[in-house]
Amino acid sequence: AKHGIPPGRGAMVLGMGSLGAGRLHASSDLDLIVVYDADGVETSDGRRPLAARAYYARLTQAMVTAVTALMSEGRLYEIDMRLRPSGTQGPVATSLASFREYQLNAAWMWEHLALTRARAVAGNADVAADVDAVQLEVLARGPSAAKVLHEVAEMRERIAAAKPVSDPWEAKLGPGRLQDIELLAQAGALIAGVPERSVAAGLLAAVSGGWLSAPDQDTLLASYDLCWKIQMVSKLLTEKPLNPDTIGEGGCALLLRETGYDSIAALQGALETQSRAAAAVIAAVLPRQKDGENA
């Protein structure tokens, strides 16, 4: 009403991370990138015209404010836009041309791993189709399997050093748990050059690529499935780290019902056993950092 209709072809919202993969739990935030195509139009045509770049920046800020505003029932979602090109140093909305240039020539390996899970979630369908085409173009030009696995091994070590885990009930972080397995699945998709958004599909791509065995895939999926169920229940029950001693009898009953175990001790034992087995699989397929050769 103030600045006119979106100049050019409009904008789309690219869902990244858990949103792109369709794996949200009760307290997930949304990782988003807004991509627009002004298509040569320099300003909007409203009563207070804006330059195209400023228009889409304000539109993005308005969207973020609307979704994250604190109301009587809380916030709808938290939004994280740090996955956009150049992170917090870049504009909040990215032109289609800039998005393509950045992804093809300037993005880091971890950004291409993240791109395997990206999915259009809102906005102009034609712009979304062009973003999909950029995604496919970038992934098709991906680096070699050896380079991807070497970088993933380095990322894994950095994550472990930055976020050491001592909580036995931590489902997201730690060897053989959610984030660890997701990273390997993204590597499978990037090496295959396709946007396989689910963990199962990414690991299947790794099996098809010949660097992960089918039994090892089953081991990883078993740990991922159990960790995901624990994570979902945990986020429903408490904002604090999961502790069976503090969630009450009903909370423990819900946890056991959703995971299919008869006792908390049995569930904890399964979590430790399955994540340890998954961690061993991941360590075996990634190169040793001292020499960069496959284990």
Image (cartoon, helix red, strand yellow):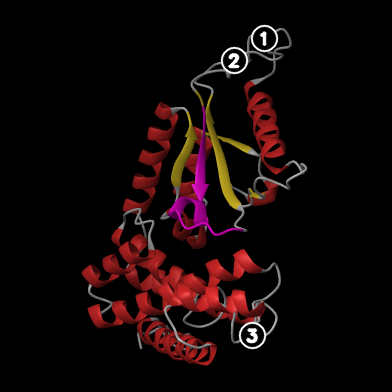
Q: Is residue 281 left or right of residue 159?
A: left
To which residue does mark 2 refer? Answer: 5
Q: Would you say the residues marked 2 and 1 are in contact, meaning their CB atoms lie under 8 Å apart?
A: yes
- Give the CA separation, mark 1 to mark 3: 55 Å
**Image quadrant where residue 71 sits:** top right
270 or 4: nearer the viewer: 270
The crowding category of the residue bearing disc 1, from other C-alpha atoms within 10 Å (few below 14, some 14 to 19, many at least 20), is: some
The crowding category of the residue bearing disc 3, from other C-alpha atoms within 10 Å (few below 14, some 14 to 19, many at least 20), is: few
- Residue 215, relative to residue 181: is it above or below? below
Disc 1 element: loop
Residue 194 visible, this orientation: yes
Q: Which of the two marks, 1 or 3, is nearer to us in this view?
A: 3
- Circle 3: residue type: Asp
Sequence-first tag of 3 and 2? 2
Quadrant for the C terminus in the image: bottom left
Q: Would you say the residues marked 3 and 2 are in contact, meaning their CB atoms lie under 8 Å apart?
A: no
Sequence-first tag of 2 and 1? 2
Picture coordinates of residue 80, whole percent (x, y): 64, 51
162 or 77: nearer the viewer: 77
Q: In the image, which residues are magenta?
A: 11-26
To which residue does mark 1 refer? Answer: 46
- Circle 2: residue type: Ile
